[in-house]
Image (spheres, rainbow, N blue to C red):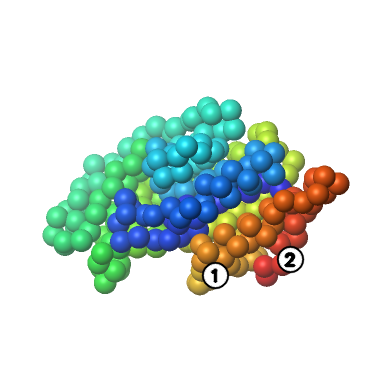
Amino acid sequence: MALFIDFDGTLAAIAPRPDAVVVDDWVRPLLTLARQRLGGAVAVISGRPLAELDAFLAPLVLPAAGVHGVERRDAEGRVRVLAGAPPDDLAQAAEWLAARHDGLLVERKPSALALHYRARPELEELCAQTLLAAARPHRDAWTVLLGKCVVELKPQRASKGEAVRDFLALPPFAGRVPVFVGDDATDEEGFAAVQAAGGCGVKVGPGPSGARCRLDDPAAVRDWLRAALQPLGPDEVEAPVRALAAAALGGLA
């Protein structure tokens, strides 16, 4: 198996502000165990920049895709970043809205931008429609993502699905059955990528999804990983891998 896993809403509960997320004590040990049991084939796929993921998961450093695939770090630690910046009029539209509504937060990321409305959920439609309208002249190069309490601008050529496909062409991920675990609409491309490769998407939480399987919340993600990766006897070296596969491909549906 190869395990691809989102961060916010999957490994950690959504917080009122992106910097207020709390990483529970189980996260680092379970990811470390998963890396050991799966031969290093574990990657975090997130909308957050790599620097933020590393800060939350320190001292653990995993292969990862940040900013929806704009930043990618392979198993050897090599980092690739898609260059670029949102056009000025897109950034100005987000800043203009945040300046007029308390509680909105503009986050500039490498080659991307996010408008958070976690503190003002009633402004969801306004935030979405403002950035969708501003992005129309740039739709050949830039995409608007509507996530949980956030509207994001990213390059067309970057996506979680494309990041997964890139990982699956490289060791130690190549030749493995992929599982992608995520909670948001922005994870749907990841679900599609792993399922096209013969694996399984696992949707965390409610809402429509193309994922074949579902878990309720980060606590359920914890319990699933613990059960699938529990220590086994010396004659059952491959059993954790088979257990994870069975859980993802059948036991969670």
Please state the horizontal and vertical placement of residue 129, each as a whole percent of the image.
30, 63
The residue sitting at 56% across, 47% down in the picture is 29
Disc 1 secondary structure class: loop
The residue sitting at 50% across, 72% down in the picture is 207
Is residue 139 visible in this depiction of the protein?
no
Please state the horizontal and vertical placement of residue 96, each as a whole percent of the image.
17, 53
Of all residues, the one furthest to the left in this rendering is: 100
The quadrant of the picture occupied by the C terminus is bottom right
The residue sitting at 40% across, 40% down in the picture is 55
Of all residues, the one furthest to the right in this rendering is: 235
The circle drawn on residue 216 is 1
The residue sitting at 54% across, 29% down in the picture is 77
Q: Is residue 86 left or right of residue 74?
A: left
Q: Is residue 80 left or right of residue 113?
A: right
Q: Callout 2, which amino acid? A: Gly
Mark 2 or mark 1, which is nearer the start of the sequence? 1
Query: Up-down: is 219 above or below 4?
Result: below
Q: Callout 1, which amino acid? A: Asp
Query: Up-down: is 141 above or below 212?
Result: above
Please state the horizontal and vertical placement of residue 184, each as a whole percent of the image.
47, 61
Which residue in the structure is indicated by mark 2?
250
